[in-house]
Amino acid sequence: MKRAALPLVFMLVFSLLLGGCFGQKTPEDVVSDLSGTLGKMSGYKSQAVLTMQTGSTPMEYDVQVWYEKPNNYRVALTSKQRGITQIILRNGEGVFVLTPHLNKSFRFQSGWPENNGPLYLYETLARSIIDDAERQMKMEEKQYVFEVKANYSGNRSLTKQKIWMTEDFKPTHAEIMDSSMQPLVKINFTEFMFNPSFEKDAFDKDRNMTTSSLNAVPTMGTNGQVMEQPNSQFGVIVPTYVPEGVKQGDIEPVTKNGVRTVVLNYKGNYNYKLVEARPTEVSVTYEQGMPVNLGFTVGVLAQTDDNRRILTWELDGVEFMLAGDLPEEEMITVAQSTYGVGGK
């Protein structure tokens, strides 16, 4: 009896060992499960801290994302340096960039975020893993760690990204790195929930112009008072960055409809204008464009039929419009160099 039982014991042990080997998921199995999770979810809510190394001092944002399938998005970006909240909103009416503390909104037709999804969107992270056939994956402390290509059109120096996810595919951390593998953008997720419920008007534009009604970080000044738009007088803000082979030309003061405007002209390898104004209109409509995170604010980038680009953004009550034949990456760098510059 004992001899007859021995082969059965060996077969059982061998089956268990074999089953254990085949029970481990391959990278392809993991990616397939991630794709299934992405396809089946009805939406999500997330809270994160975004850090951008755009200069000598990192810029930090609190980022709150709400997504409801198929097309409702609400992204609240609160600058820790400026204490200002801006909201990217997509609903049945279009895509908006809202600046509640100025009661200002930009509306435009856009494929955002499908055309250029940012790092803080779950779909962007998941798709970058799914679509990269050369992805690398490993396990660290019961988390999947993926290394994949970075594909962000506004910054060609961003080449690689690492993404950390739990075993049920909730993101915990991500980094975008340059060619030297130095992290330039980091995001830490503090909360993430699949398939949440949303109030009926959660993605309504008018309601989102009052951020406190949706539990976003309120827009407050350093003394605890709500920040107000400065008066109509401002100095000329000259960008600190000028592309190689470009020289600044004349500065033209213009008054149109009672609004003081200045135009800075640049010529050379690239030809462009920077228009600065403090308009009274609170709503602007663009027929095309996409939101662009400049680090200190959210801008709107559009391209004309003659291959010229127009980038618009607001900073401390001054509205900027950069227009010309600059490549997107150069245009963003010029815009970023207006931050922290005093008016002359």
Image (tube, grey):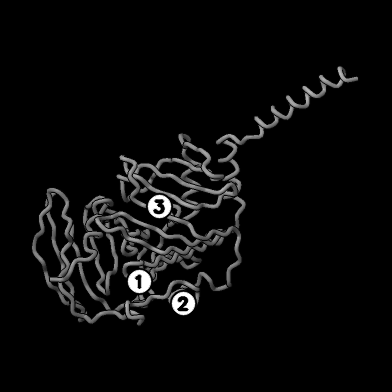
User: Picture coordinates of residue 304 (x, y %)?
Assistant: 29, 56
Q: Nearer the viewer, residue 6 or 130?
A: 6
Looking at numbered disc 2 in the image, what kind of residue is underneath it?
Ser
- Pick out the residue farthest to the front: 2
* Residue, disc 1: 83
Q: Nearer the viewer, residue 324 or 199?
A: 199
Residue contact at pointers 3 and 1, CB within 8 angstroms = no
Q: Residue at x 35, y 59 (%)?
A: 293
- Distance of label 2 from label 1 (alpha carbons): 14 Å
User: Picture coordinates of residue 59 (x, y %)?
Assistant: 32, 60
Question: Is the N terminus in the top left, top right, bottom left or bottom right quadrant?
Answer: top right
Tag of residue 116: 3
First reached walking from the N terminus: tag 2 or tag 3? 3
- Distance of label 3 from label 1 (alpha carbons): 26 Å
Which numbered mark, 3 or 1, is in the foreground of this view?
Answer: 1
Looking at numbered disc 1 in the image, what kind of residue is underneath it?
Gly
Q: Residue at x 44, y 50 (%)?
A: 174
Looking at numbered disc 3 in the image, what kind of residue is underneath it?
Asn
User: Picture coordinates of residue 67 (x, y %)?
Assistant: 52, 61
Q: Residue at x 30, y 58 (%)?
A: 58
Image: 278 above or below 124? below
* Residue, disc 2: 212
- Distance of label 2 from label 3 (alpha carbons): 28 Å
User: Picture coordinates of residue 231 (x, y %)?
Assistant: 23, 82
First reached walking from the N terminus: tag 3 or tag 1? 1
| Element class at badge 3 | loop
Which numbered mark, 2 or 3, is in the foreground of this view?
Answer: 2
Q: Nearer the viewer, residue 295 or 102?
A: 295
Crowding around mark 2 (Cα neighbors within 10 Å: few <14, some 14 to 19, many 20+) is few
